[in-house]
Image (cartoon, rainbow, N blue to C red):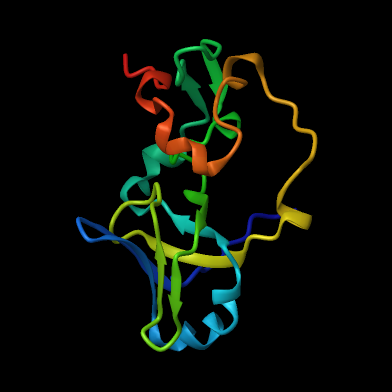
Amino acid sequence: MTSQTFVCTPIGFVQANDQGYALHMESPYRAALQGLDEFGAVTVLWWSHLLDQPQHRQVLEAHHPYTRSPEVLGIFATRSQLRPNPICVSVVNVLGVDPQAGVITIPWTDAEDGTPILDIKPYQPCVDRLKEVRLPAWCQHWPQWVEDNAAFDWAAEFDNA
């Protein structure tokens, strides 16, 4: 297969400030929010714009990214924002949807304020959740559910050396 170029147009952006978190949709995409208020969570695909530089796109290995991980992990074995294509994904709970204003209110996200949103999909357990998951030993102690992340000491998991 030959190399191809794709164009993605952001459909909105992340708002993260002292008042809380929200996903703001651009006007042309607000009609796409109809019915989303019936879902309790969404999967958000976003562009890691703060790390979208040629040198970051070339990072293919992470050197001891987690305190219990092997010395080297391939970037695809991490959730790092450094990627050949800096596309990231987050599952977030939905607190409210205002289609007229184009706002999805959420409790938290790991995307930065101003992050471009590429797509939003409703979280559906029948296609988004697996009953049996195999994990490496170094991360088996991590929370099993998104809701448990707030109480987990994530700072102790990352090797900042």
Q: Observer-nearest residue: 91 or 5?
A: 91
Q: Residue at x 58, y 21 (%)?
A: 139
- In the shown orientation, is residue 130 left or right of residue 83? right
In the rendered image, the vertical position of residue 98 relative to residue 159, given as above or below: below
In the rendered image, the vertical position of residue 128 relative to residue 70, given as above or below: below
The mark tally for this picture is 0
In the rendered image, the vertical position of residue 129 relative to residue 43, given as above or below: above
Q: What percent of the width, then of the height, locates residue 126?
A: 78, 56
Q: Residue at x 51, y 49 (%)?
A: 85
- In the shown orientation, is residue 56 left or right of residue 43? left
Instruction: Tell me which corner region of the image, top left, top right, bottom left or bottom right, holds residue 157.
Output: top left
- In the shown orientation, is residue 145 left or right of residue 57? right
Q: Residue furthest left?
A: 18
In the rendered image, the vertical position of residue 10 relative to residue 20, given as above or below: below
Q: Observer-nearest residue: 160 or 51?
A: 160
> What is the quadrant of the C terminus in the image?
top left
Q: What percent of the width, then of the height, locates residue 103?
A: 39, 75
Q: Observer-nearest residue: 105 or 87?
A: 105
Q: Observer-nearest residue: 121 or 8?
A: 121
Instruction: Tell me which corner region of the image, top left, top right, bottom left or bottom right, holds residue 98.
Output: bottom left
Q: Residue at x 36, y 65 (%)?
A: 22
Instruction: Tell me which corner region of the image, top left, top right, bottom left or bottom right, holds residue 95.
Output: bottom left
Q: What percent of the width, then of the height, locates residue 114?
A: 29, 61
